[in-house]
Image (cartoon, rainbow, N blue to C red):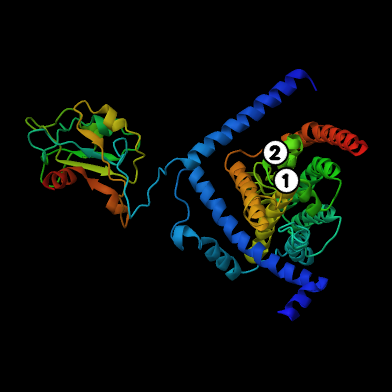
Amino acid sequence: MSFSKIKEALTGLKSLAIGLGLTGQAFCAENVTVIYPKEQVDNLSTYRGPVELVGKDDAPEVPKCVACGVCGKACPSNCLTILSPIPVKEGEIISSPAQMGPAPQKGAKGPGQFILDFSLCSLCGQCVKACAHKALRYSNNPYLVGYNREDFRFDLIERLRKRSRD
Amino acid sequence: MNAFLLFIAHPAARIILWLVLMFAFIGFNGLILVWVERKVAAYVQRRPGPLHVGPQGLLQPLADAIKLMGKQLVTPVAGDKMLFWAAPLLAFAPVTVCFLPMPFEGRFNPLPMNLGLVLILAFSGLGVVSLCLAGWGSNNKWSLLGAARAVAQSVAYEVPLLLSVMAVAICAGSLDLYAIVRHQGAWPWQWYAMKNPLAFFIFLVCAVAETNRAPFDLPEAESELTAGFHTEYSGMGFGLFFLAEYANMVIVAGVAAALFLGGFQGPLLPGVWWYLLKIYSILFFIIWLRWTFPRVRFDQLLNISWKWLTPLALLDFALAVVVAGFRSIK
């Protein structure tokens, strides 16, 4: 039983006391959780919900998106599908986001369809990071529910319109 | 009224009355402690805890108990049926005996004896046999490992526990809990916790280890052994182990309160309230420990006992002998 062992034991005892103090403080502190149906949390600024389109400043129902397709390329799980605004032929559309590149038609500055398959998304945020126009952001509704898989295939343009109407 | 007093005067009647009272107390205390445990856990983790059954969730343990009683009792096919079902009963039975010499109130002693402390130590030692039987009878590797751990742990911590208890008993000159309590006063500086803080510390650590509570809950370590010795128990089989654990906690807290905190002695209030207050303060502390410290490793557990607590307790015991010896010469 050397002197250093005793010193080690004493520091150990001290840290045990500090630990008790910490939990004691937490015991007396206020709760941080809320009981959901009665109360709701309000600190959602950093919450990551499924991504949504950002509307233009002057026209909130029109997405800022220029349909460049970079977000779709950046997505590791392929959950974003950005479709060309005008069908090339009747019933035929350019469907692969990887082929999109710059806007395929002259004058086309927005997506025809912007589909997010949330059932594949892991909320990694690569799409939000990749977007040069800041046209994508996280939504902040933590109470998202659905009855089946299809409920999580979001038409983001539709959702943007609905949001700007409300 | 006279007939009742005569009835009370008979020792057998007093013991029966006391045991019935204690059964009720153990059951009620189990419910309260489960609630306290869950509330303390919740507040330490800064959440509200049980809320919806009864006011502040007070009836939640009752709902749990009804659920436990309604469950099917499953016996492992390859297990030893006799041992398997004897174990929970054996875990619970000695607990009630341990309440007999507990000094709840100075004026009422259900069974006057001068070896109350020894009775408690002897019968609380039986608890580990039930864990051993449960582990063996279950025919399950986790149960068996849990049982082996329980036995090793119990053997290791019984030694410093007994030494720290003996240090106090030597100073008080008695093994009767009532006499030891009377030897202390109503105020904290008259308590053995102040006169012999090392013994109090050793007793508390050993008490937590003997009742298999975190951070010494290795026999039932969830993350390593599923549930240790009670992995295979369902319904009230598990319920009895659970109840016995909480009753054991009350016993060690009761012994600690009597030995070190002046038991039923205290100003103004009747003794029983002081005793309960002291018991529940210690219980709160034990629960607080559980939600603060992570579980120790098995080699650490045994090292703490054999390398630290046992030598320290021996030293403390020797000092107590010297002090008590000088006092008796004077």
Quarter-of-image position of residue B92: bottom right
Asked where in the image residue B197 lies, by quadrant, the reply is top right
Inspect the image, locate mark 1, and give the three-letter code of the amino acid beneath it: Gly
Label 2: which secondary element: helix
Q: Residues within 10 Å of mark 2 (few under 14, many from 20)?
A: few
The chain containing the residue under callout 2 comes to B
| Crowdedness near tag 1: few (<14), some (14–19) or many (≥20) residues, C-alpha within 10 Å | some
- Disc 2 residue type (three-letter): Trp
Q: Are marks 2 and 1 in contact (CB under 8 Å)?
A: yes
Q: Residue at x 45, y 46 (%)?
A: B47
Residue B88 in the image: above or below residue B225: below
Residue behind mark 1: B185
In this rendering, do the residues under marks 2 and 1 share a single chain? yes
Label 1 secondary element: loop
Q: Position of residue A79 (x, y in %)?
A: 30, 40
Q: Nearer the viewer, residue A136 or B67?
A: B67
Residue B250 picture location, percent across and down:
68, 54
Residue at (70%, 38%) from the top-left corner? Answer: B189
Could you say which disc has been placed on residue B316 in the image? none
Question: Residue at label 2?
Answer: B189
